[in-house]
Image (spheres, rainbow, N blue to C red):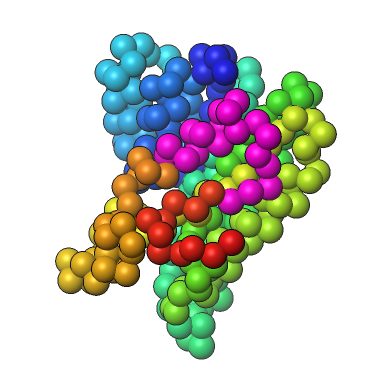
Amino acid sequence: MAWNDQVAFVTGASQGIGRACALLLAEAGAKVVIASRNLDQLHSLADEVARACGEEGRVLPIKTDVSSEDEIVHAFEKAQQQFGKVDILVNNAGATRDGLLLRMKRKDWDEVLTTNLTAAYLCMQQALPGMVRRRYGRIISISSVVAYMGNAGQANYVASKAGILGLTRALAQEVASRNITVNAVAPGFIETAMTDKMTPDAKEKLAGRIPLARLGQPLDVAHAVKFLASDEAGYITGQVLHVNGGLYLGS
């Protein structure tokens, strides 16, 4: 694959897994559209890419709230204007609003499902027409280990991440004939802003449940995303790549 011919669009790119994915794809040579609500962090990432790659103009930061369909459409229009296409879509943007289902507010349910699942569907719809015309594309969505294991107090988050799996499998069958692959990555517990809320004792106990005895790093997930975006993964579609240190060993 000639990475310098590729254009990647990464949602939730301002921090954590999204930032690591964007940086790794840019370092490989791809042009990268980075979308997030935090424009300052996006500009910081763009500066980091320019320093790492010694080249400006390969990263396009776009302030985007993926809960808004209009903002998603606008972001893809800007990507098209700047780079002319999107070859790789990484659906990474995510939100949590934890609480027991018995007391969960409807707005907390809706916000998580909208950000984690509906936004992925909307981004896919924007990216697909060009991919279908060019008969090439890579779509990778970030699910979670909890889509398989469940997690008390996260019914909305678990439902959204399980929905990503079904969406991935359905779309993979719809577009395989156009040489478009659609896969998911299911991270375990990764050192991000979400896990930063945990106490050191809670992190230590959690690491004790993981066979590799540590929480993952964003780069662990980014390497999986890069692989699924590569030519080496060209015969893989409708699949889930687990990146969880052995926490979950099921199929």
The answer to if 234 sits in the magenta stretch is: yes
Name the residue at 75% across, 30% down: 179
Q: Position of residue 66 (x, y in %)?
A: 54, 47
Occupied quadrant, residue 109: bottom right
Percent position of residue 14, x then y: 37, 40
Q: Which residue is rendered at x = 49% and y = 63% of the image?
A: 249
Q: x and y percent of residue 122 in the render?
A: 66, 46
- Magenta-tinted stretch: 222-240
The count of marks equals 0
Is residue 75 visible to the viewer in this orientation of the structure? no
The quadrant the N terminus occupies is top right
Of residues 83 and 160, the one nearer the viewer is 160
The extreme bottom residue here reads 102
Query: Does 248 sit above or below residue 87?
Result: below
Residue placed at 68% from the left, 58% from the top? 166
Residue 59 picture quarter: top left
Is residue 61 located in the magenta-colored stretch of the structure?
no
Location of residue 12 in the rendering, given as x and y in whole percent from the top left corner: 45, 44
As drawn, is 14 to the left or to the right of 122? left
Q: Residue furthest top?
A: 55
Residue drawn at the location 51% of the way across and 14% of the way down: 4
Q: Nearer the viewer, residue 77 or 91?
A: 91
